[in-house]
Image (cartoon, rainbow, N blue to C red):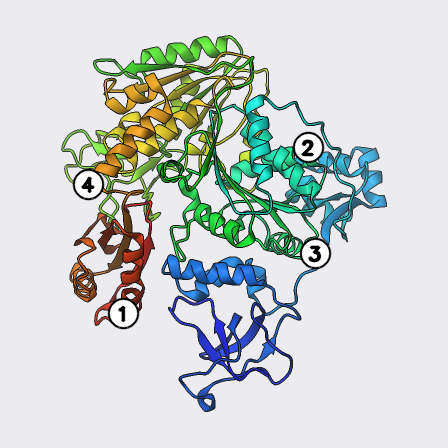
Amino acid sequence: MSSVLRVALPIPLPTLFDYLPPAQGEAVVGSRVLVPFGRGKSVGVVVETDVSSDMGNTRLKRVLRVLDDAPLLDAELMQTLAWAADYWLGTPGEAYANALPSLLREDKPLPETREPMWQLTITGLSALDAGNRRGGSRVLLQALSAGPLCATELDMSLPDWRAAARRLGAAGLIERGEQAMSFAPQPSLPAPTLQAEQETAVNVVAEAFGKFQPFLLDGVTGSGKTEVYLALIERALAQDKQTLLLVPEIGLAPQTVRRLRERLGVPVEVLHSNLAEGERARAWLRMRSGESKVVLGTRSAVFTPLPQAGLIIVDEEHDGAYKQQEGFRYHARDLALVRGRALNVPVLLGSATPSLESLANVEASRYQALHLRSRPSAVRPPHVQIIDMRAQRLEHGLSPALLHAVSETVARGEQVLVFRNRRGYAPVWLCHSCGWHAECPRCEHPMTLHAAWRRLICHHCDHQSGIPATCPVCGSNELKPQGQGTERLEEALTAHFPQTPVWRIDRETTRRRDAFEQLLGNLQADASAILVGTQMLAKGHDLPNLTLVAIVGVDEGLLSVDFRAGERLAQLVVQVAGRAGRARKPGRVLLQTHHPDHPLLHSLLSQGYATAAKELLAERRQTGLPPYGHQVLLRCDAHQRAVVDAFLSEARGALPDTGTLQIAGPMPAPMPLRAGRQRGQLWIESSSRRHLHATMRPWAMQLSQLPSARKVRWSLDVDPVDLY
């Protein structure tokens, strides 16, 4: 029997905890255990067995109970998590907690992996025949009249079915049961004939099955990257292997799952934060057992067990959503590569606008590049035009040329996307008499007007207040909104085009579960419509009747102080432009700007993303910025600025003078006050990743022991992507 167990607990402390073995049962590495902690109990993961404790066995508490008969986390995942905690300077407990769905972090038996299903009762069949139900309830009754359906099937066909199921279940018209995963798969659709570039990409990646090799699939929008993914997943299935497919946003999951199921004819697991906890746990366990072969998920799905791993795919690999911004700050794309190496499987990164990091890895021969340069023969790239806004009379931020183009497009029965990466009605509520503007008292930042809710809301801390009718400084009633958010654009376009439906798609309109999919479902393929949206619409959505894309607010990306702003703007323009003309109708893209001669826009529009990215990489190389330099950001906040400055000064003083580091700070954060707390940061940079991490590891352990550490909240961010 093991003498001492070392356990990771889900708490933000940079240490593991020693316990005596349980009185009954044997705990092995990777299994969950229930342990006493403080005045309560906690569920942890056994990381090591048979170790010696510095505390001495007499002072150790005993494990209360072993929760698993076999390790829940296999050796590969345990090793990967240990590496991740070390690299991203996270606490071990946070890393292991991220790997488990929340239901599996509780002192409960493992849930059954059977799939929930619903079926009509005799009473429900009678109600359907009698026509006693309307709306969503009747639609669900009709769907179930053909036979029982499981939750995942209903998710695909009826995005809003759950509310109706609760009503019908309470009325005794339907009943819930469970069925095994052996349900008959949906009919498989035939695979299309691949183009030459697609076929080459599939063959090259498939030849690497059984060994680790990173690939970058650089394909223009509409070139068929998804078909390459599908063909490779089919080949992995033919070898009875599992595939992990990562997407950056929940909004991409439903349409991608539907496409996978129609094509592959096998169950496809889904893992993202909008799922019920039971569904997430069951999907995770089915992948762990090998019962399921394909899983699609967002960032946290990178921790899915893959005992029969064959392939890992990261779609839209450039997307910043793959970086966790709170707690354990890992990057799912980079962790996917680490897992690919550990599992000996190829990792395919796909994007129409690859990150500069991935392009640098291709340049250094660490990744193999694959290219899809052509769209299907009938699909032409959209025509891109710059609208010079200087000296133009604007209507709610929209130029006459843009409004004329929208009018022409909807008159043809086609659809328009007006893209504005700012939600709300207006970013500023301003007094025209004295210049006062509504400011968040907790952030000292302008509050955004949300007209539909009749509230001023801070987008940084969610502080809310009413809308003053008069200026609190001068008493004037000349208060006006300044600037445009998606809500104001929606109002303006609705007034300008009253006969055309205008749909706003942003965080406010998609809060409810399945709302995003339902909004997209409202778009009839052959009807005119205007979409107003944020970056939620920039990612992979296929709208065949969308022929015009108008991007407003371009100048914000051109004038940002963030060194990544140029890369992000170029990616955003190309990705949003890629929504136009994806079928056989020609597409058109309009960019509104006061800087039509900006070098980045000129390079991007005249020579394409590859040339613009090459120029941006040259700038990064010259300045030693990532990917040619490596960074760690120490953030901290407290109620008093002096405490923040004291902690950061102590932290800087604790850094050894190695001669290989460049240190900036202590300094205020770009947003120095947020939610009533003063914020500051310390930047550490080095041209050598190895030297940087050799210094950071012992330094990170010292931070919690600094005199001011208990007075602040602090965090370390390795390879930060957000300055704030």
Q: How far separated are the C-alphas under marks 2 and 4? A: 61 Å
Please name whichever residue, 699 or 672, is drawn nearer the observer in this view of the structure: 699
Name the residue type under label 3.
Thr
Image quadrant in which the N terminus is located = bottom right
Question: Which numbered dot is residue 472?
Answer: 4
Mark found first going from the N terminus, 2 or 4: 2
Question: Which numbered dot is residue 702?
Answer: 1
Which residue, given by chain and number where applicable, does mark 3 sit on? 113
Badge 2 marks a residue whose secondary structure is helix
- On the image, the x and y values in percent for residue 291 come to 70, 52
**Where is 333 relative to 642, above or below?**
above
Badge 3 marks a residue whose secondary structure is loop
Residue 367 seen by the camera = yes
Quarter of the image where one finds residue 55? bottom left
Mark found first going from the N terminus, 3 or 2: 3
Badge 1 marks a residue whose secondary structure is helix
Q: Which residue appears at 85% of the width and 44% of the height?
A: 122
Q: Which residue appears at 56% of the width and 37% of the height?
A: 205
4 or 1: mark nearer the eye: 1
